[in-house]
Amino acid sequence: MAVPTAFAQNSVRGTVTAEGEPLPGVSVVVKGTTQGTTTDVEGKFTIAVAPNATLVFSYVGYQTKEIAVGNQTNLTVQLAPDNQVLNEVIVIGYGQQSRRDVTGSVSSVNEQVMKSVPRTNAATLLQGTAAGIRVQQSTGQPGATPRVVLRGGTSFGGGGEPLYVVDGVIVPSLYGINPSDIESMDVLKDAASLAIYGARAGNGVVLVTTKRGRQGRTQVTYTYRNATNYVRRNGLQYLSAEDYIRWNRIGLRNRFLLAQADNNTSEMNNTRNQLNGSWGFAANSSFTRSNGLYSTQNVTNANRNLIGDPMWNLLVDQNPFNPSQTDSLLYRATSQRELEDLILQRSSLQEHYVNFSGGNEQGNFALGLGGIQDVGILIGSDLKRFNMNFNGGLNVGKNLKITTNLAAYSTNGNPSYLAGNDGIIQRFAGIAPTVRLTDDITGEILPGVDGSTLGNPRYLNGKFIRTTQEQRFSGSVNLTYSLTDHLKVLATGSGFLRYRNAENFNKLYRNGTFGSVNSARASSFSNNRMEQYSYNGFLNYTRAFGKHGFDVLAGGEYFNNKAYDQSGSGIGSASDELPYLDNSIFIETRAGSGLDRWYRFASAIGRVNYNFDGRYLFNLNLRYDGTSQLTDPDNRYTLFPGISFGWNVHNEDFFRNSSVSDVVSTIKTRLSWGQNGTLESGDFGTVQQYYNLGLYNGIGAYGQTNLVNPRLNWEKTTTLNFGVDVGLLRNRLTVIADYFVRDVYDKLQSIAIPAWTGFSSYQTNLATLQNRGFELELRGSVLRPQDADGLSLDVSANISHVKTFAKKLLDNGLERNRQGAVRVFDPATNSYQWVGGLQEGYRAGLDEIYAPIFDGVYKTQGELDARANLLNTFLPTTNKRIKQLGDARWRDLDGNDTLDTRDFVYVGRTTPTIVGGFSTALGWKGLSLFGQFDYALGFISMNQIRMRGLSQVQGSQNSPVDIKNSWTPENPDADLPRYIWANYGRNYETGAGSGTPPANFWEKGNYLMMREVTLSYEVPARPLSTLLKDRIKGLKVYMTGSNLLYITKYSGTFPEEGGYDNGKYPLPRTLTLGVSATL
């Protein structure tokens, strides 16, 4: 009888997947032994094991998983992503690096944000997902590019767009790029990291990497998304037609009383005449016509038959100028909702996207094709976009690798003819409710009140053709040749082309129902072509020996940018069907212009990364830039250095042996300093320009446009950054914190020069700006799944705070070299102080608001008598001491019986001081729930829709129902001042239409936005394989709500705007249904 010397072994097969895709190269090891194998290109493996064995599956970037084999012979293994942030690989300038080795300040966008919401602009991916970045969406126009500002910006006004680099190609913006093609998005923030991009990196760099193919069988992934947009309506309730007429008549009476007190006979007569004027509350004789502008009319024998008609209403009211007279008026009413709907349309979005990818030992490829059609909320607006993105890699022999990227984007947009109207919501929500939209008899659609500004969109839509087309093409070829095991040659050639065309044509239309016919049929066009080419070459040396590790990069780059602009305009096309400039009949009215411009950069680039024993990290970046945009040889070339240090404290023996390491898994401190720049002088900032003066005595002449300074230099940015990265509880919680001080010096400033020179100013490099701030990022795995179907909960959050100071300004002889400041009284010091604007050594105050204080209303004669001598400099009357019962009381802060700007007080800032976001991701058995939120704090907004309605500055506009709480003799305890037509009494704003609203009416703009909530379900692999016979490898369905809810006390609809919220194109709420299938 034989005795076996080993246990019997069974053959176990299986497949390893991750996120529905086969995972090649996974290590499969029998626990406790060295026996193992790896998965093939299709994620499959075979291994012989004992029945009681446990298999350990591990792969970089994924959580290790153990499975007891038992009597199983076929395993399906799903690996979950490892959310340890400190292990992730991030993109840096001209390379990649593990976050463990990064010594600068770099933020990465949460990949969950890229997966579910259809977006027409990829820049919105940055919103609330990366610390130190503010993304401001100020319009809902399809495809609109949001404002992106990094660390407070490099201008005193808080502006400065970062540099965008997509797959190594510099692009002017992320417009047109399909977010579905994006694999990662990283943001370089500190100057040491940015120094490798030199003169163009002063505002930060956003690095975008698109999807690559993986080793394994070819797979096809198709995604379809269908979204419905819902308008975010104006929350104000407006007066009914009856109250609108009644309150404007009260406003006329109060205006008359004010003019009477001023002995202004002309204004008294003018106010009387408004009762029969061209306003929606007036009884103009033309309104009795079936197509009159408004329907309001006095009852006469001719129209008495309309009394009792269900389409008409009767108002009996006291005459505002003759209390003994009663007026009877007829009017038709249009609801507020109907007026708002005039500018809205059914809005939806559809997106199709397909990705082909695959690879083997010889190479890989990925091709993404996508199309999107977005019909906007505002009437006449839409956008169509097509995208193609290809990445390929080829291994040629053992030493040469070739990679290439080709991308094409084509967009066709039709912005609404109303899109450029900043107050579009305010204007149409507040249209007089007595307006006539159609003829009373024929039903014909009428032009409306006033041309394209307040005209009837039902009539005007289609009268104004606005089209924009843009095509972008980019490509790059990258060669990597290994000379030795440690030395490589890198070479890249890339190009980018953009063609942009805009065409406008106005058809024949009437300027209001009784206005003149605009028959000019004006047409115009503009064409822009930009092309740029870049070539770079590097030597890259990497070596590790003993405890030392080096990564050295050295080389150079050449960059060439050319742009061509053409435009033309003309009038007099013979027909609405001939919308082209060539059809303009009046040749003498045609105008055209053309411009060619170019610039070049030549650069030397170097980088050294040094790592000692995984503990001490050192990084040096150098870039020597030269540009054709500067003409002075002494300024044309500049060195931009960056140096940083890191210390992995957790790799020290003293730390490992301490009890702290039981809680703190990893800790790295970072220190960096660097310099980079921007060139704000533009393409012709140092070159004299001339303009065409036309003919003089038959001879052409040219004039000098400006006085240039040929010695203009770069604006240089120097940043000192302190940072720490901490991993807690085996890296279940990671903390990344940074504090920075950034100086932007040699900023451009305009110097006033004597008038005899023929010019008013010229530019020079003089000012210095400073940003100071901190950033904090938190990411945590609250619940880690035991297997792929287990319960998981991941959270992340970020916050940033920044302040901007005017460190140095042009010497102008004024105290602190102030610019744009206002002088106000300070009760604390009992003296006058200059505040706001720019002042040396003080925080920049261009976004500060100063306003008068509203102290209630005058309710008694005694209160009027006590302030009889107060002079209000803002009143339009001759006698500026007039005050009547119900007028606004203004605080005379300095007690000099004069109300002027010196009585203004600080209200707040229109730019947030704190911005951030947070997200949660909950998963279980294929179900996942993801939520993304962002917030902004520390700023104020003015609801101009409400304020302009209360003050009724435009004469015919409707007012919110709040106006009913205005002071009247019958309502003497009201909170709001008496209503005076068209703000004649300055009871709300210091000016007629564009004055400063009271401090009390400004509101905190603080908000928390529920930006996205996605519920998804991934069908398990086994039932999917059984049902569909392996035809579909993965299937995921999901539902997403985006831009769902503002949690805020602000009364307006768009708190993101900050400052004056006039009611721009609204940002819609969106509900998306989607499906993604992998074949």
Image: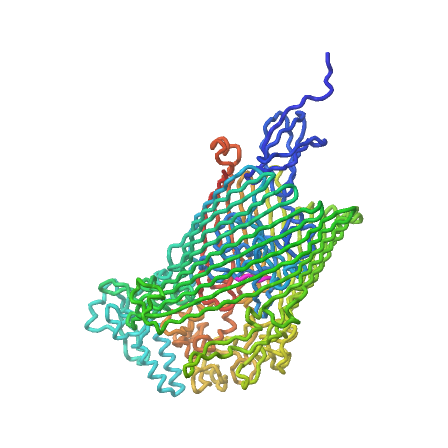
Residue 964 drawn above or below residue 656: below
Whole-percent x and y of residue 261? Answer: 40, 86
Q: Quadrant of residue 686?
A: bottom right
Q: Nearer the viewer, residue 246 or 442?
A: 442
Query: Is residue 24 toward the left or the right of residue 100 in the image?
Result: left
Task: Identify the residue at image location x=62%, y=45%.
Answer: 401
Q: Nearer the viewer, residue 368 or 13?
A: 368
Whole-percent x and y of residue 482? Answer: 67, 46
Task: Identify the residue at image location x=45%, y=67%.
Answer: 1062
- Judge whether residue 330 can be spotted in this image: yes
Whole-percent x and y of residue 909? Answer: 56, 69
Task: Identify the residue at image location x=58%, y=75%.
Answer: 837
Write down the region rendered in magenta. Answer: 147-151
Whole-percent x and y of residue 302? Answer: 19, 72
What is the chief secondary structure element of the magenta stretch? strand
The stretch drawn in magenta includes residue 1050: no
Q: How many marks?
A: 0
Query: Is residue 624 toward the left or the right of residue 980 in the image?
Result: right
The stretch drawn in magenta includes residue 148: yes
- Judge whether residue 1010 can be spotted in this image: no
Residue 505 drawn above or below residue 996: above
